[in-house]
Amino acid sequence: MTAELARECARYAQMGWMRGTSGNLSVVLQRDPLRLAVTVSGVDKGEVTAEDSVVIDVDGNAVDSDKVPSAEAALHARIASVAGAGAVVHVHALAPVVAAEHWPNGVVLKDLEMLKGFGRYDHEEVVIPVVRNSQDMVELGDAFEKGFDPRVPALLVARHGVYVWGDDLVRARHRLECLEWLLRFKVETRDIFTGRHS
């Protein structure tokens, strides 16, 4: 699993979604008690190796290690616990952040074929929740849980980034790639649907 985390980090870094040391990934190792492998803090995500992960508990604390987990590890654990996710991906792609800026009460997506890749039918209305940013992971976790919809495997954190989850890292990646496209479409066509012209 740790080698898989490294490979996925390298992929996202090449896409420009994990610039410098930003972003973090996790994968569930066991459920009872909850244990996740999460990328460590402060490492360039384009240079992550299989050694650059740490096992955390349900509160985001390192288990039997002096390695420092990502500052957002506790939110990964909260999402895994509440949503039953097998993997959580957090990146700083630009489109989700811009979308959250335009639609701070949630981003509505509908009638887009790419929704199928996100795990929904294209005719369904999907609302991607947006929460205010905070350095307090308990506060962020509470905001996530308050607006949690089991049909929507994503969370936008305003002026920060996006979290997407799935049964495993590959499924989470596929969902993230599709969601990024959907949000980019939403942002780039905003003026068309609001009647604004440059």
Image: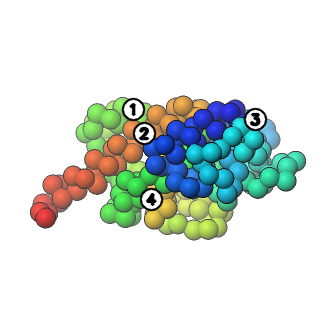
Mark nearest the camera among 2 and 4 is 2
Q: What secondary structure is marked by label 4?
A: strand
The answer to which of marks 3 and 2 sits earlier in the sequence is 3
Q: Using the numbered discs, state the Cα–Cα distance from disc 3 to disc 1 in whole angstroms.
A: 27 Å
Residue 184 versus residue 194: which sits nearer the camera?
184
Which label number is shown at residue 117? Answer: 1
Q: Nearer the viewer, mark 3 or mark 2?
A: 2
Observer-nearest residue: 81 or 99? 99
Say what amino acid the circle numbered 1 marks: Gly
Precedes in sequence: disc 4 or disc 3: 3
**What percent of the width, then of the height, locates residue 146?**
54, 58
Whole-percent x, y for residue 83 in the image: 59, 43
Colouring scheme, one of rainbow, by chain, secondary structure, one colour: rainbow
Q: Of the residues under marks 4 and 1, which one precedes in the sequence?
A: 1
Whether residue 70 appears in this view of the structure is no
Could you tell me which quadrant the N terminus lies in?
Answer: top right
Between tags 1 and 2, which lies in front?
Answer: 2
Amino acid type at image mark 4: Val
- Drawn side of residue 17 relative to residue 5, left or right: left
Give how far across and how far down residue 145 sits, in percent: 57, 55
Q: Which residue is mark 4?
A: 130
How packed mark 3 is, by other alpha carbons closer than 10 Å (few <14, some 14-19, many 20 or more), is few
Question: Callout 1: helix, strand or loop?
Answer: helix
Q: Is residue 180 visible?
A: yes
Marks 4 and 3 close (CB-CB < 8 Å): no
> Contact (CB < 8 A) between labels 3 and 1?
no
Q: Is residue 76 left or right of residue 36?
A: left
Residue located at (27% from left, 38% from top):
112
| Residue on which the image places disc 3 | 30
Name which residue type carries label 2.
Glu
Q: Which residue is mark 2?
A: 177
Q: Nearer the viewer, residue 27 or 52?
A: 52
